[in-house]
Image (cartoon, coloured by chain):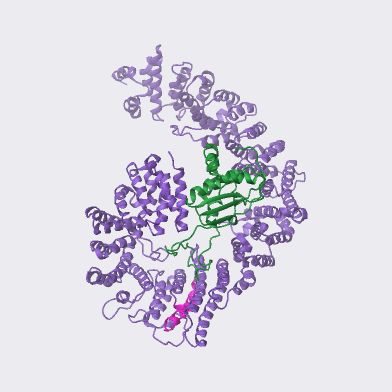
Amino acid sequence: MSESYRSYLINLLPLLSPTNTHFVQHFIIPGISSGSADFLDIVKALGEYLTSEEDDLRTKGVQMLSLVIERCPRDKLNRQAVRVLTTFYCSKLEDTETITPALRGLSHLVTFPSFSSLEVSDVLSSLFQQVKMKSLVQSTRSYVYSIVDVLINTYRDHLKNIGEQFLSGYAALASGEQDPRNLLVAFKIARVILTDFDISKHVETYFDITFCYYPIVFRPSPDDPYGINVDDLKDSLRSCLSATPAFGSLGISLFLEKLAVAPSLTKRDVLHTMAVCFPVYGINIAREFGRNVWNALKLEIFEPTDPLTEEMALDTLRVFVRVLLSSSDGADNTIDTVLQAICTDSLGFVGEPEKAQAKAGIKVLRTLIDVPSKLGVDAINNAMETLIGLFHDPGEVSNRAAVIALLADLLSAFVASVTPDPSTTTEQASEDLPPLIHSSLTSHKDVIIGMFIVGLKSSATRLPGIRGLSNLIRIPTLLTDSELGYIVFETGELARKEPDEAEDATTDVLLLLASIALTAPHHLANQTLPSLFAMLPEQAPSRDAQTERAEYWRALRILSKLCAQPTLFEILVIRLIAKLELLCSLSMAQEISAGGTPRAEEIERSAAYAHALLVTLANTLSTKVSKAPPDPDVPKYVDRLLSHLFRLFLVAAVTSERRIMQDQRLLRAGARIMKLVVEALSIEQQQRFIDGVGAAFLHGQVKAVTGGDFPPLTEEFKPIHVDASTHQRETVILFAAAHIPIRKEVSVMKNPDVKGLSVLSAFLRDLVRWCDLSTCSTLQRGAASELFATLVNKYADDVSDFLNEMRTSYFPATLNDSRVPIEARRKAMDNWVSISRGLVVRSHPLALSFIDSLLTLLDDETVAWGAAHALGLLVADDGVLTKRNGAVQKILHVQKYFNVVLPKVMDGANKVDGTKRATAYLIALASLVYAVPKSLYATQISTLMPLLLRGLEVAHPEIRWQIIETFSDNVSAFSDDELLSTYASTLVVTILKNCTVVDMPEHKVRVAALKCLALLPTAVRYDLLHPYKPRVLKDLAMALDDPKRAVRNEAVDARTKWYKYSG
Amino acid sequence: MNAQIFNANPTIYVSQKSSRKSRFEAGQSLWVDDDDDDDEERSSDADVEPIDQDEIFELIRSISDPEHPNSLEELRVVSAEQIEVGDNHIVVEFTPTVPHCGMSTLIGLCIRVRLLRSLPPRFKVDIRVQPGSHQSELAVNKQLNDKERVAAALENPSIVETIEKCIETAESSRRV
């Protein structure tokens, strides 16, 4: 090294501050790395500083050296240099001025590869002799811990050889440490020492330096810059406490002492730690302190401070019991006295079922079953016998409910222990149940079933009885088939009873029966279902026979709950279809015998009954199809259910007389069933079905969908023809339902047409014409809309002819022509919306031009409102174009649409003012914002706010409702946005105008307004709304007297919130 | 407030689901609802649904007992049958769990405050203990139905605090 460099260093050094690492980083380290400067040269250069008499200079010298070492490449120090440096640093530890930088240097030096075990002893002995931890600050102490930490991890064997000296030395160093940052490292070191070193002579010392921190109550300040996590700290201390069995006797006593006095949070910590420690401390300690531990835990379990602590105590007990049982292996005849005490105590409590402690007793007994042992089985046996005895004791009749509940609790232990994970199969699970317990359960099960069944008979014991039974049936391989049959027989009785008699047990009974149905459907089929079917009358009850009607509906609802299981569902379908057929033919027979058309009232009764039957089928199917994965048996109902339904509906459609199956509500229910079944079909099955449906509805070949069975036609079936009868036209809803759930791979009307248009295009064009007829009902137009949406969405490329025709001729000639009557234009708007929606959802390129056409209509007064409303409908969920229905959906299509439309609408709303046109834009904005998720416009809410508030002035209830709902959705934005909170007062005033029946006749709006008002107190600062409180309370008092119950409920809520709203 | 516990071990009953019937069950319609959605949409705006005993019961059933972590309904302190709705006049009877229950007045006050806030002002509300269910029946009734006394009680901050705590559960649990 050149002399100039050296003098340069010497001149610079006095200017250095301890934090000036820049100099080291950029001037010295590069020299060392490149080899142009030797480390020893630096030491030499620093020479006089390192030994200077002046404290300040000396400190700086050592600091400088440590900084260099810290940044020095690890391979640039040879053994000799390390040796010299170690000796040097060790000597500097005596000096109070240099101890901090010296420790810092050492903490880095020990990580060098050339540092060897030779130096370890030197470092340690100087540390132990020179360093007085109490006089050092936290950061300096942390160097000491990090030195020891590195040494103990790298030179563990060497440290073991040092042995005694190290153990006592470190203990002395570490004792009295207070800072959590250092403790984290200290606990880590202690854990290694306790597990790897022979501490037999230092148990007490180490006990002192670890247990003195227990339990940790340290709480970091909320903005703790050091990021100390209390849980980390607790965990690492816990790992020390549970590191060695040597702590056993000392530790347990301390735990018990803490447990007795601690607050509940600490109690849980202590219990957790005990659970961690028991397995380490071992069986001998567990035996020695067994009594005391049990007494302490008993207190926590039987007189719990809170449920969490009780839970934790039970967990600890479980571990404790496992430790106690670990050696005996069940074969050991000398049963532990502690375990015996646990059993006797718990059994004692179980013997008094009326007390709350009995429940805890059962919980304790359940912990005994986790480890298979004779003792556990005996205890369970005893408990069962005790409970059985109590149940039969005439003096204890009043406690029967409690007894049954306890028994049910006890049994749930076996359910829990064998609940099959998704990964384990049931066979494995049943093996888990120890044979001893199984045989004990088997020997008691007759009595137990008997008790539960008796329990069903009276209202107080009914619910626990049902719970017991449902636990019992879930214990694998316990009950025989005939016993299940008996249970079904007894509970089935209950299911049929009047709801007043069975009170609210019906739901639970049905759940029980439904779970039996999964394993043993034949019992339900033989015992429960027949009597339920018997409750269904042959004919619809007369109009005033309200109870009969309620009864058939109850039976149907129960059937719907029970019959999701495949075998039972098949029975249900057969029986209900038979009923339906009977109803149809009976109503025809009456007509003939009466010699004319039956009265409308009679038809309605039968239709309502038929409707209930169809709804039941639809509800049951919905459960089957909606679950994941859907039941595999659904597809076969194309033939077994849909063909029957088609026949019934179509026969009714081709006659001019009144038939029950012509009712719109029935058609809707039928369509729902159809959608559910078709949804479950595979693509091939859908193809076959759609081919049949097409043949029937487009070409009149009705037998293609009815399974080949149809009476001779009186008139031709051609529902989509322009001069079809109303009844025929209405069946188009079934046609639509069949098409809604099909996948896009299914081909529909593929044959090319003579005129060059594809068949599908031609069909859609015909459908538009069919729709625009003045005779077209709402139901029919709804069906057509669904067809437009689904077909355009799935086959957009096949229907480009149709789409072009719509744009080029239909839009200008019908929608945008002011000479066309308003009514016709409104209807045309519906078609337009459905078609556009099909395109928007798949982000089709043509979608934009369809949207633009709608936007131009906003300036046409006659249809502006409709168009404005439609802009929201385009992205609202309509239940047709959904994933389940196989719609072609592009991700982010809503965003795309929103980003195109919002600027245009906002523009319009801001530009035109005070006219009807402005209103149209406001409506468009409101329905658009309402339809999309709030995240899309969250950033623009402050610009939207004034426009939406203006929109609230529009008299249209639907618009007001949408805007208020939007506000409710965004009310949380008020709390964090300063700008927005200024609108809060305006909002309160405007919304109050929608709360009372005088101002707002539509109750839906009133409900929304009150809900929104109720949200404000939690979201907005009190001082902003303080002036309005009296007025709100006064106006809400009027809303309390609303004619609608739903409104009153919301008013009560809102008013209470405002009562409590204060600064 | 009061360290003495009047009934340490009350009988707890199961709380019932709402007893409100749908239009079909009430015999107003032949038709069952398609789905399980509420019939709000269907009922037209012209229909008037008067305040009935079920509705009053809904308001007070989930008030907590001052002594136990249970609702008044679970303790059978209040029930729908004990409520009478007349023209602008409501009588609510409640049954203390034990005849010497010192909390009766407080329970009554809770019911009164809850109804005061939740009912239109046109109603006159009488709150009484069920005849024969309390040893100082008359005193309690007088206390609960005297405007001045109620007002005086509600000026005591610690009473108000207890009441607020008890009726808090009624306010939050009504959301179904």
Write down the colour of chain B.
green
Comparing A44 with A390, the one in front is A390
- Tell me the magenta residue range: A634-662
For residue A416, above or below residue A167: below
On the image, the x and y values in percent for residue A453 come to 69, 62
Q: Position of residue A744 (x, y in %)?
A: 37, 69
Q: Which chain is purple?
A: A
Q: From the viewer's perspective, is residue B28 above or below residue A392?
A: below
On screen, residue B93 above or below A979: below
Specify whether residue B116 is in view: yes
Q: Position of residue A915 (x, y in %)?
A: 23, 57
**Residue B112 highlighted magenta (yes or no):** no
* Left/right of residue A176 with respect to residue A753 in the rendered view: right
Q: Residue at x 41, y 72 (%)?
A: A737
Q: Which residue is more in the foreground, A828 or A279?
A: A828
Q: Residue at x 45, y 29 (%)?
A: A112
Is the N terminus of chain A in the top left, top right, bottom left or bottom right quadrant? top left
Is A841 situated left or right of A341 in this image? Answer: left
Tell me the chief SS of the magenta region.
helix
Q: Is residue A393 visible?
A: no
Quadrant of the rendered structure where residue A497 is? Answer: bottom right
Give me the residue at 45% from left, 46% from top.
Answer: A1057
